Amino acid sequence: MKVTVYNCRSFDEKGLFEKYGKELGMELVLCPDAPNMENAALAKGSTCIDIITSKMPKELLKVFAENGVKYVTTRTIGYDHIDVKAAKELGLTVANAPYGPCGVADYAVMLILMTIRKMKRILERTNIQDYSLQGIQGRELKDLTVGVIGTGRIGRTVLKNLSGFGCKRIAYDLYENDEVKKDGVPYVSLEEMWEMADVITLHAPLTEDNYHMINQEAIAKMKDGVMLINTARGGLIDSEALICGIESGKIGGAGLDVVENEFGLYYYDHKSDILNNRELAVLRGFPNVTVSHHMAFYTDDYVETVVRDSLLGCKCFMENRENPWEV
Ligand code: NAI
């Protein structure tokens, strides 16, 4: 049973691959690079390859199929980086490795707390021994209404997490969820969400219909001092409108794990580079905007789950057993 693993990170994944490979009786080829035309030959003799978010177009899939690969698993939830139609035509089975919602949900609540308590300003001050109080007075969740947009796996976990804080919770989704309603959280229209929420946290996927759902018009309808949290996708918020909202004081703060046009930027060390994302530079500079590099998912549970389940899927496939990870 041989699996070739691409983009294998030495600092967190390698040890786990070695552990689970041994436990599952698999021979693993661990490659630190993304799969490409040149290193596809490494997969010769492997039934399965294990990848992350690098693009898998038809031409590349074809080379793997020619090398005898039958199964492509991705250590992510999304698989839109793989041309699934082409894979099927080439006789390749595609699978993913979903991880739990708690990592992102915890992180969203952390960003909410950091934003309402002005934590960025506080941390900046303690770094330079400025222990003054002026300008860092926070707000308490029990006095606030938090609006959750998107009540899927992550949004629902955020609502559960928030239940202990005594805030008023409201929700918006295209489809109402019974569990949410049973928990006493009312669904409201988007117009009501803009009017009622002190904090809005986004947990919907980015689609053609909701691109820039938070734009100038929506912001104008929101409460003065509203705080926006985005751990979903950058394209849900119009960055220019967000910047204007922060500058005018309409928006009281933001916590952003994702921003527009982050593709190709994050997960690399760009210390010495001149970057071409002006919105990110401006947003990073505001004292009331916390920015992180799309890593809300990144926990020990996440790494362990995707490594283990991607290999378990390979094993199921090779043993011709039912495989819950096939897409
Ligand atoms: P999910 O599929 O379980 O839930 C998504 C929910 O959004 C569904 O209830 C759906 O009906 C709703 N929805 C779809 N379009 C909508 C719209 N226009 N307006 C309101 N609601 C809408 O997805 P899950 O696992 O909860 O993930 C949510 C999002 O979180 C993902 O789509 C992804 O963008 C983001 N994410 C971010 C991560 C990070 O590290 N920052 C990691 C994982 C996911």
Image: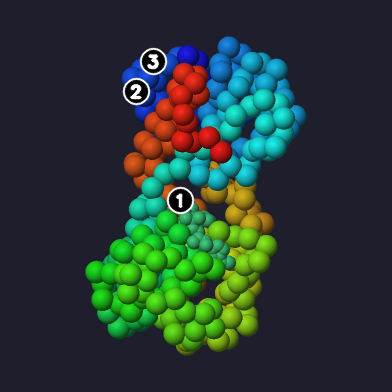
Binning the other alpha carbons within 10 Å of mark 3 as few (below 14), some (14 to 19) or many (20 upward) gives few
The residue at label 1 has a CB less than 8 Å from ligand 1: yes
- Mark 2 / mark 3, whichever is N-terminal: 2
Q: Position of residue 275 (x, y in %)?
A: 63, 54
Vertical placement of residue 92 versus 255, above or below: above
**Label 3 residue SS:** loop
Tag nearer the camera, 2 or 3: 3
Label ID, residue 19 = 2
Q: Looking at the picture, which amino acid does disc 3 mark?
A: Gly
Binning the other alpha carbons within 10 Å of mark 1 as few (below 14), some (14 to 19) or many (20 upward) gives some
The quarter of the image holding the C terminus is top right
List the residue tagged with mark 1. Answer: 295
Q: Is residue 131 left or right of residue 79?
A: left
Q: Quadrant of residue 43?
A: top right
- Mark 1 / mark 2, whichever is N-terminal: 2
For image coordinates 55% across by 45% down, the residue present is: 78
Nearer-the-camera pick, 65 or 259: 65
Q: Position of residue 80 (x, y in %)?
A: 62, 44
